[in-house]
Image (cartoon, grey):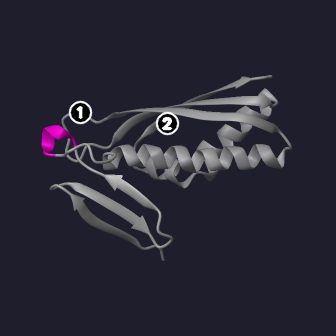
Amino acid sequence: MVTISINRVEGDFGFEASDTNGHVVRLDTSAETGGNNYGARPMQAVLMALGGCSGIDVVSILKKQRQVIEGFAMRIEGEREKGKEPALWETVNIDFELSGNIDEDKAYRACALSIDKYCSVAETLRRGGTKITWKVQVNKP
């Protein structure tokens, strides 16, 4: 079982979430709803979790294939449902940007395996109705 602790530490809506290893994430709501920009919005943190989950998968897969990863970045954009409460992620688009001595077909396959098979956050979003699209770009040295 995983245990996360949440403590209010800043103003009305500034929270710190921590895991049992002491890792801390700061959360807040928007200024329009009373926040102070203390931390990420919780729904933004979901997209951050998607990036972390998928990034770990992709790097792990490519390392097993002996690909040399010199740079790795992701850009994730999401659009939430309009006029609904709660407003779930309707669409999410991921741009994978890799550099190094990486075979493009292997990079594409690693990203596909992550998003379609291994990443638990991606599957959680899909089960909530989110349409996830992605593309990969490899820059060779």
Is 69 drawn above or below residue 41 in the view shown?
above
Q: SS of the residue at dot 1?
A: loop
What residue is disc 1 on? 82
Q: Amino acid at mark 2?
A: Ile
Residue 81 within the magenta-colored segment of the rendering: no
Please tell me the numbered disc located at residue 94.
none
The crowding category of the residue bearing disc 1, from other C-alpha atoms within 10 Å (few below 14, some 14 to 19, many at least 20), is: few
Task: Specify whether 20 is left or right of 6.
Answer: right
Dominant SS of magenta comes to helix
Residue 33 within the magenta-colored segment of the rendering: yes
Q: SS of the residue at dot 2?
A: strand
Image coordinates for residue 19, horizontal then vertical, percent: 45, 68
Q: Which residues are magenta?
A: 30-34
Residue 56 visible (yes or no): yes
Q: Amino acid at mark 1?
A: Lys
The crowding category of the residue bearing disc 2, from other C-alpha atoms within 10 Å (few below 14, some 14 to 19, many at least 20), is: some
Task: Specify whether 12 is left or right of 1.
Answer: left
Residue 126 visible (yes or no): no
Task: Specify whether 76 is left or right of 8.
Answer: right
Quarter of the figure with the C terminus: top right
Image coordinates for residue 23, horizontal then vertical, percent: 47, 63
Asked whether 55 or 15 is in front, the reply is 15
Residue at image point 25% right, 43% down? 37
Q: Give the alpha-carbon distance from disc 2 to disc 1, as whole Å.
A: 17 Å
Is 137 drawn above or below residue 28 in the view shown?
above
Residue at image point 31% right, 46% down? 41
Please tell me the numbered disc located at residue 132.
2
Is 60 drawn above or below residue 76 in the view shown?
below
Image coordinates for residue 7, horizontal then vertical, percent: 28, 66
Residue farthest toward the front in the current orientation of the protein = 10
Is 42 drawn above or below residue 132 in the view shown?
below
Residue at image point 27% right, 58% down? 15
